[in-house]
Amino acid sequence: MTGARESVIVTGGAGFIGANLVGEILRRDPGAHLLVIDDLRSGSFSNVVDACRRIARSPYTGELIAQDAGALDWDELLDAAEPRAVFHLAAITDTTVSDERTMIETNAEGFAPILHACAQAGVPLVYASSAAVYGAPAQARDRAPFPEDAAGEPANVYGFSKWLMENQHRALTEACARTGAPTPHVVGLRYFNVFGPGEGCKGKMASMARQLAGQILAGGRPRLFADGEQARDQTPVMDAVRCTLAAAEPGARPGVYNCGSGKATTFNALAGAVRAGLGTTDADAPTEYFEMPAAVRRFYQDFTLADLTSTADGLGVRPQRDPLEAIAEYASSLKSLWERTGSLDSPP
Ligand SMILES: NC(=O)c1ccc[n+]([C@@H]2O[C@H](COP(=O)([O-])OP(=O)(O)OC[C@H]3O[C@@H](n4cnc5c(N)ncnc54)[C@H](O)[C@@H]3O)[C@@H](O)[C@H]2O)c1
């Protein structure tokens, strides 16, 4: 391991958002030493290679530790690597996993050593929480933006594991305040629905934009739960990456923030943007609606929308892309991939 000041640690760096983050770090600072920690349970080396080619426009120059992030000795790791920041994105990301023990052990318990070692060593830490911590707050019924304090009743164990991570962070912040110790530079980001290049490994957890594009390109019709008017905050991946990097900057205020587009996109509008990007019409590929199964209904978020007021104040960052435009552009890149390879199995 290289003990350089300019190293950056990215857990989950072989995953979708993590690899895009790695690419952007190297684009901004080609001399940075990247240390990716990823046990490759849902990620792949190919995400790193592709993101570096796509974003940094040069090959990956760092290391990859293929181990469970929560099982490492983080005091030792930080001592040896002396990173300027740690981005902790590693997690079980299949929101349908119902093995509660594994989800909580991996996502929440695995976070504790990272949080405490970074706080102790004074290393800025940015970690991935999720819009899943909101469940279905009152704002969802009113189709209004979700302020950060509306969270706390997640509807699935994945969301609960993220809430437990935030609880550890809040407890640490409170303990510091009680003892008069400085607040550690720790930022939790509640990513909303992130989409874009590099999500090829996510299978059924890939974004709706990718799934609908795949259905149309394969000659089928886009399939949506009736009546398609459910709406989600669809976040272009590079806006999520910019927000993530801003959170590690010295001026960022520690805390937990929403990371989204600030716009609610209905699935009908999303399908329209996908069609536009693919160059098809409603008549060519009309939407097929189907009833939501009862098992899905119990956990389903009909509406999500990030309130970005605190994010702008605390992190000094705002989304740059319009989600519908970014979806159409993404669909168009998927079409080119399909035409080149006959599948969407490889990136983007
Ligand atoms: N993509 C989204 O829309 C979205 C939304 C909300 C939150 N998030 C969060 O953002 C983060 C990144 O998500 P993503 O979409 O890139 O998912 P992803 O599955 O592509 O990436 C997660 C990565 O973490 C790795 N990983 C999992 N458990 C690990 C462990 N214990 N040790 C080391 N590596 C491990 C996986 O192999 C994978 O490469 C996750 O924490 C996820 O919960 C994502």
Image: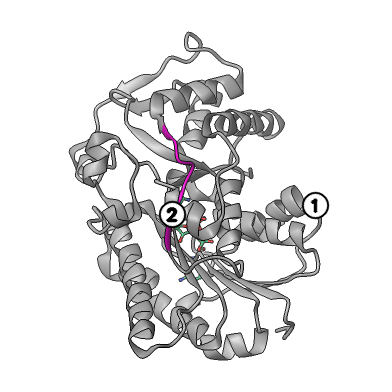
Counting every numbered tag in the picture gives 2
Question: Is 297 covered by the magenta stretch?
Answer: no
Q: Which residue is mark 2?
A: 310
Q: Which residue is mark 1?
A: 57
Q: Position of residue 3 (x, y in %)?
A: 72, 86
Q: Identify the residue at image location x=76%, y=57%.
A: 27
Question: Is 262 covered by the magenta stretch?
Answer: yes
Residue 6 left/right relative to 128: right
Q: Position of residue 83 (x, y in %)?
A: 65, 79
Answer yes or no: is residue 333 visible: yes
**20 over 142 or under it: above or below:** below
Q: Identify the residue at image location x=23%, y=47%.
A: 137
Coloring scheme used:
one colour
Q: Quadrant of residue 243?
A: bottom right
The residue stretch that appears in magenta: 256-264
Q: Quadrant of the C terminus?
A: top right
Q: Position of residue 66 (x, y in %)?
A: 58, 73
Residue type at mark 2?
Ser
**185 over 302 or under it: above or below:** below
44 and 112: which is toward the camera: 112
Q: Position of residue 70 (x, y in %)?
A: 45, 78
Q: Nearer the viewer, mark 2 or mark 1?
A: 2
Which SS class for mark 2? helix
